[in-house]
Image: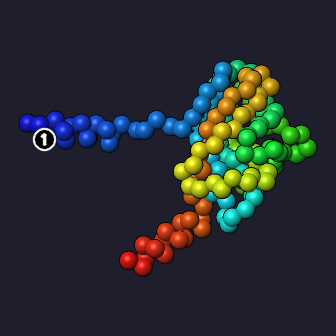
Amino acid sequence: MAELALAACFAASVASPAPAHEAKIKNLQIVHPNAVEPAGAGPADVAVSMTIRNHGRKSDRLTGASSPLSGSVTIEGTSGANVIDIPAGETVKLSSKSVHIKLRNVKDQLTGYDMFPLTLTFETAGSIEIEVMVEEGPSSMTGHDEEVNQK
C-alpha cells in the first residue's frame, strides 16, 4: 500500500510543471532572464536575454539596467535610443541575436547554473531586481560530449 502511495506522489510531481523562472512588476512579467556562459577566461561582455510581457493597457519602456558584475550595462540592438519599447498587451523577446541587454567587461567567471542580480528600470513600472540564470555555453557542452564519448 505504501508503494502505491509513493508511486502516486511521484506521478503527481512529474505531471506538475515546475514554476517558471520569472518576476513581475506592476503589469510587466519578466520571463526566464538568462545569459550564456562566456567562452574562455578573463573579462567578457555578456548578453542577457529574456521575454517581457506587458499585460497592461498602457505601453512602458525599459530605460536602463545595472548589475554589480559590470560597471557598464547597455541596451543593444536598438536604433539610436538606449531604450526598449514594451507596447500594451504585447510580448517583447530580448535575445543575443536581436535587441538585448549587454553587461560590459564582466570580470567574475560565470559558469552554467550560476545566478546573478540585474536591476531593470522601466519608465512607468519602476525598478525591479531580478536573478539572471547562466546557461552552459557551447564550449561546456562540447567538453561534456567528449567526456561522455570517451567512457
Q: Residues within 10 Å of mark 1 (few under 14, many from 20)?
A: few
- Tell me, yes or no, if residue 51 can be seen here: no
Applied colour scheme:
rainbow
**Residue occupying the point 73% across, 22% down:** 125
Instruction: Tell me the kind of residue under disc 1.
Output: Glu
Count of all numbered marks drawn on residues in the image? 1
Outermost residue, bottom direction? 150
Q: Quadrant of residue 23?
A: top right
For the residue pair 52 and 10, the one nearer the viewer reads as 10
**Residue occupying the point 77% across, 22% down:** 124
Where residue 34 appears, as percent x and y from the top left, is: 62, 46
Q: Quadrant of residue 1?
A: top left
- Relative to 65, 136 lies left or right: left
Q: Secondary structure at mark 1?
A: helix
Where residue 71 appears, as percent x and y from the top left, is: 81, 44
- Tell me, yes or no, if residue 123 can be seen here: yes
For the residue pair 80 and 44, the one nearer the viewer reads as 44
For the residue pair 62 and 102, the one nearer the viewer reads as 102
Where residue 66 appears, as percent x and y from the top left, is: 76, 38
> Looking at the rendering, in which quadrant would you find the C terminus?
bottom left
Q: Is residue 56 above or below residue 5?
A: above
**Residue occupying the point 53% across, 71% down:** 143
**Residue occupying the point 67% across, 59% down:** 38
- The residue that label 1 is drawn on is 3
- Relative to 35, 2 lies left or right: left
Where residue 64 appears, as percent x and y from the top left, is: 80, 35
Q: Quadrant of residue 74?
A: top right
